[in-house]
Amino acid sequence: MKKLLLSVVCLAIAVAASAQKLELTAGAYSGLFKYSGASSASSAMMLVSRGHFNSEYTNSPYGNKFGVGYGLSAQAQLVSKGGFIVGVQTAFEQLRSKVDINEIVIYNPISSGPGNPMAADGSTAIKNTVINLNPHLGYRIPISKIKLDILAGTDIGFITDAREKGSAKTDDGTTYKTNVDRKTISTDFRLRFGLAAHLNKFSLNASYAHGLRNYMEGYVGGTNEAYSRVVRVGLGYRLL
């Protein structure tokens, strides 16, 4: 990590010394987010507790189906005469995973214990609110009137909130909902690769980020692994 940051700084200095121009861009994008790893799941059960303390939660909330979120970004990058790029993007984003709910179990831990599973239809999402920092390097290729940027860098995601929000309905028409704090880590780290095509002041961009931080680190018992995967597609407008 230290070697990577040092390399970025050295290249930034080199590009700045020969920079042709500074570009400032504002953007918006859709973020497709899911979890990967042994603890991620495509379907899960919702547990509803009745007794002294009522609670509802999803037993496997780390969904491996893409949920749809959004982001707003601001980016600054230097482009050298030779086409080399060094820049940084900062963004506010809400990223949502998805897991299907196909069963609900109601139980009273004091008296009757767990009841029989009931068929249900619904889904649960973990909504992560993130301030994201994306330092990146790249190279610009001119193609007719379009300029194509090939970019590689990292995501440093500062997670301000992570909350499970679920809703499922049983065959008798009863709807059950969850609202649970699921924040386990404060910072996610991802490797990120992307493309950006520029035409005049507008740009179309797409990227993939591969998370390296385990969202279930510190959990005890069994295999606990859940890593983020993010696909972003968006539009940008160059201000400078």
Image (spheres, rainbow, N blue to C red):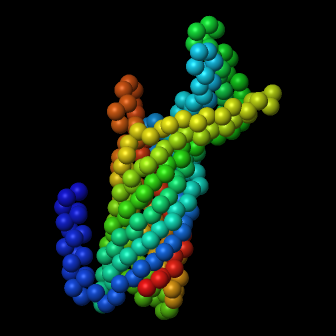
Which percent across, then down, holds residue 202? Answer: 53, 82
Which percent across, then down, holds residue 3? Answer: 18, 61
Q: Which residue is farthest bottom?
A: 144
Residue drawn where x is 66% and y is 34% of the image: 177
**Closer-to-camera residue (175/196):** 175
User: Vertical placement of 141 versus 226: above or below?
Assistant: below
User: Vertical placement of 71 versus 226: above or below?
Assistant: below
Quarter of the figure that contains the C terminus = bottom left
Q: Quadrant of residue 108?
A: top right
Q: Which residue is farthest top?
A: 111
**Closer-to-camera residue (92/201):** 92
User: Vertical placement of 22 versus 54: above or below?
Assistant: below
Residue drawn where x is 61% and y is 15% of the image: 51
Which percent across, then down, holds residue 82? Answer: 29, 88
Q: Quadrant of residue 167?
A: top right
**Closer-to-camera residue (152/89):** 89
Residue drawn where x is 51% and y is 86% of the image: 201
- Residue 21 lies left or right of residue 112; in this view the side is left
Q: Quadrant of residue 172?
A: top right
**Closer-to-camera residue (40/13):** 13
- Residue 194 lies left or right of residue 67; in this view the side is left
Which percent across, then down, holds residue 203? Answer: 51, 79
Quarter of the figure that contains the N terminus = bottom left
User: Vertical placement of 181 versus 152: above or below?
Assistant: above
Q: Which residue is farthest front?
A: 52
